[in-house]
Image (spheres, helix red, strand yellow):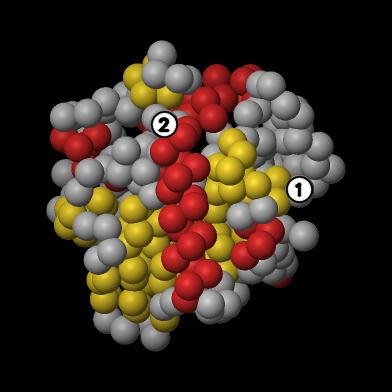
Amino acid sequence: MARKDSEQQKTSMSLMFRGRAIFKPLNTGRIDERVACVREWVANIFFYQKNGTTIMIDAGYNYQRLREKMGWLDIDPSSVKEIFITHQDTDHVGALENDSELLFRDATVYIGEIENRYLTGEVRRKVIHGLYKLPLVKTDNRRILLKDGETVHIDDIKIECIMVPGHTWGHMVYLIDDEYLFTGDTIWLGADGGYSFISTLAEDNRLAVRSLEKLEKLLRQRGQPLKIITGHTGWTDDLDFAFRHRTEICRPFTRRYPDPSAPYDAYVEDDDTEENARSLPLTKVRT
């Protein structure tokens, strides 16, 4: 993958999904005092901050405005020493690419050991029901490989790693400090609740549904309040809403998902401004 691939994906995906109410990214800003968010077209990357430590969840596109938007949040890229990757798709690892601005060249990347096989080239990432291979990502960052159920501590931040394959073969979600669940591309939040993520972008949709069942069971057993934060469709603190359509798959080309809050073309960023980032909290999806 290279910068041109990010630009090409922006163009093709905009044409493919325009008007379908599929992507509803958060604008750049803060969910609360711990979680900040940058919008890169349809994708969100997140920063978790606690007691002077900042970790990053996902690395977005190979995106030229990342430093600028991080500045809106008063986050210096050099302060980010650890990056947790949910999966290696083009819109989740681009800032680590060798032809990116290398804002995080000294950061350690945490990624699932199965998902890492995409980065080594042992496995190629396929979308559109296996018909299209995504470009290979090349990065020189130091990597630490994670196992399902493993818990990592970065200073006094606790990160629990939960594997939820389906969208990709080694997709991880991260439960941070038992309060914040970063789901990447496992849950798609529509106006009427959460579904398994977009059908055309999954390696195995049936596996994705089974993974959501496992995840929901785990979270309900814990019985703790949570903020469930997705990669493309906002956040919610309502567990019932997040898993309301867990056994159903978001199928953008066979069903319409009416949502008056969804942008016609989420790749247009006109409403993502520094003024709003500094003044408006990022509200949850209404349930």
Residue 89: assigned label: none
Q: Check the image and report above or below for 64 versus 51.
A: above
Residue 204: assigned label: 2
Residue 257, image x and y in percent? 76, 35
Label 1 sits on residue: 191
Q: Quadrant of residue 218?
A: bottom left
Q: Residue at x 31, y 84 (%)?
A: 156
Q: CA distance from mark 1 to mark 2?
A: 24 Å
Give the total number of marks visible in the rendering: 2
Residue 85 in view of the camera: yes
Whether residue 33 sits left or right of residue 151 in the image: it is right
Q: Secondary structure at mark 1?
A: loop
- Type of the residue with mark 2: Asp
Q: Are marks 1 and 2 in contact (CB under 8 Å)?
A: no
Furthest toward the top, the residue is 131
Q: Residue at x 41, y 14 (%)?
A: 131
Q: Quadrant of residue 123?
A: top left
Residue 246, image x and y in percent? 59, 48
Rate crowding at label 2 as few (under 14), some (14 to 19) or many (20 or more) other CA atoms within 10 Å. Answer: some
As rendered, which of 88 and 138 lies closer to the eye?
Answer: 88
- Type of the residue with mark 1: Ala
As rendered, which of 56 and 197 lies closer to the eye?
Answer: 197
Residue 61 in view of the camera: no
Whether residue 169 sits left or right of residue 195 in the image: it is left
Residue 134, image x and y in percent? 36, 24
Q: Check the image and report above or below for 189 versus 255.
A: below
Q: Check the image and report above or below for 150 versus 215.
A: below
Q: Check the image and report above or below for 63 versus 34.
A: above
Whether residue 14 sits left or right of residue 153 in the image: it is right
Residue 72, image x and y in percent? 56, 62
Rate crowding at label 1 as few (under 14), some (14 to 19) or many (20 or more) other CA atoms within 10 Å. Answer: some
Q: Secondary structure at mark 2?
A: loop
